[in-house]
Image: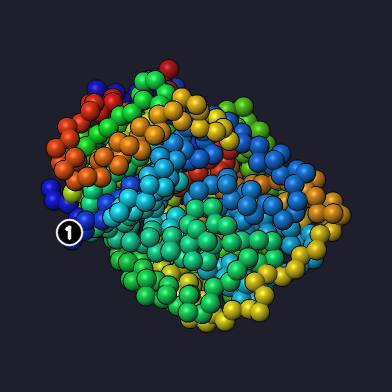
Amino acid sequence: MTHKLTGDQLLTTDPLARVEGEGAMTVRVRGGSVTDVELRIFEPPRFFEAFLRGRAYTEPPDITARICGICPVAYQMSSCLAIEQVCGVRVDGPLRDLRRLLYCGEWIESHALHIYLLHAPDFLGFDGVVDMAPHAPEAVERGLRLKRVGNEVMTLVGGRSIHPVNVKVGGFYRVPTRAELRTLREPLLHAREDALETVRWVSGFDFPDFEQHQEYLALRSPDSYAIEGGSFVSSSGIAFESADFDLHVREEHVARSNALHARLHGVGSYVVGPMARYTINHDVLSPLALEAAAAAGLGATCRNPFRSIIVRAVELVYACDEALRIVAGWEPPSQPAVEVTPRAGVGTGATEAPRGVIWHRYRLAGDGTIRDARIVPPTSQNQASIEEDMRSFVQDRLDLPTDELTRQCEQAIRNYDPCISCATHFLHLHVERA
Amino acid sequence: MTGSAGATDVALVVGVGNPDRGDDGVGRAVAALVRGRALPGVEVAEVRADPTVLLDLWEDRHPVVLVDAVCSGASAGALVELDLRRHRLPRTAIASTHGFGVAEVVELGRALGRLPAALVFVGVELGDVGLGAPISAQVLAGMTEAANRVAALLRPATIRSSPPRCSPPG
């Protein structure tokens, strides 16, 4: 049975499927207006920052990787950058290239998972990929192939695809030989073709007419699409370094969520992730990725969050391109890591996880003991924007039957590829018409 | 529906679970017991997360036995067995990677025509899944029987003639 949201009503989503973690969404409608939107994250806090206190400066890459099975590399890389900053070490050259290659593997795996297994079924009217598979078997197989190649990259460079074990502060425990990396060339060439086909496929979907107006925040590097480092730049031109993140971003507790909400000073809510990255960095995409974006109808910016699936597909092309570039030019360094000697101080590191920028800050004692740690993952930064999106999205669709509205709300939330397990960690949806 | 094209006579046992969550690690522990028996023509694999790898792992393998912890309300350590060519696992979105668990992968394989010709699920009822907890005594006590049952299932005739020993829960 369906109902329309005409009076005072409540729309809810029960545990939201196809997102990571435990949470719920409640939308209250009174007198034909949306009065309240609450993204409630009730998955308990996981206390990783507290675990890190008292541990050695060498441990965060392995400890923080356990926060997420989808984006462990993001946690490893941001923690390494932060600790290396404290210790006055900069990792560059082939070791930085290898970090970028590992990160490309994570982007390929994560984006393929979200596009094909989690998000595409929304656009094609299926409850999930299992229901979609008999109707689009070639597409599902393509997604699985892409995911497999991402896993191959992570396994070869990181030691294994989930929670890689080959990353250390200063670099890696072991670097691959040229011959070993060369084995990735053929799979990546096929993956790049699959990624291009992905852009063509998703750009043919029907997209709801909807625009978001929040500030976009992403990392930017001078000569490449920022992944494993960079400086913060926003869509209105606010720019700052990682070390100044907490001068510009304020985290606040809201009673409905075990994940802190983040607000950009002088702006308010903001969006991190593929939409922000594309808007701020599209000019430094590879020619092939730019060409694919243009053919898919993406301009210099993208403000419809439903079209984030196209942006992810373009980033898939780019990640394959970048991985191929690094594989082709790989010359192993003489040492797998730079020596990192501990010293007292504070350091920060920021990198671009598949679903948005992730920031770490550590304070070390002179012997390298961690005195204090802060981790700001992407989903917690996007919480307030998800609520704002839902407020205007639902307001314009109050004439829809409740079950259809609920379905579209879930799709809108999945635009963000939220990872509640990272944010603390998500999702039931309630639309309340009291 | 047919099984994977080009299936060999190499059998596969896959233990699924997280050994850092107490009894959730029992699938992998049972797989390790089977590995220790060094059965000829039998490969053993363990999957901790991302069960989509099952679609590749079981390609060209026959028969295939999946071992995992289950939560049905039975006594801890109790065994449940399902012929997945004929029955479905209940689909849940709890504690899996972006809501994609073993049951979803089995159904995805069925939809894509990528199930092995013989695929049996052996479930061990879990008790304690505390963080960092060891496998509980009750579940430990049921592990040898589970390994024995897996070994018996690896004889193709057993799988082909074996009716399911219970109905799919839920």
Q: Is residue A112 left or right of residue A279?
A: left
Of residues A316 and B138, which is closer to you in this image? B138
Q: Between residues B124 and A95, which one lies in front from this camera angle?
A: B124
- The answer to which of B55 and A412 lies nearer the viewer is B55
Disc 1 marks which amino acid? Answer: Ala
Residue at 69% over, 61% down: A169
Label 1 CA crowd tier, 10 Å (few <14, some 14–19, many 20+): some
Instruction: Tell me what residue is drawn at x 57 percent, y 81 percent.
Output: A331
Image-quadrant location for residue A313: bottom left
Give how far across and how far down residue A253 sits, in percent.
Answer: 66, 33
Q: Nearer the viewer, residue B162 or A259?
A: B162
Mark 1 chain: B
Where disc 1 sits, the SS reads: loop
Scheme of image coloration? rainbow
Residue located 30% across and 54% down the image: B40
As drawn, is A144 to the left or to the right of A347? Answer: left
Q: Position of residue A295 (x, y in %)?
A: 34, 69
What percent of the width, then of the height, locates residue B78? 36, 25
Residue marked by disc 1: B5
Picture quarter with the C terminus of chain B: top left
Residue A398 visible, this angle = no
Residue placed farthest to the top in the image?
A434
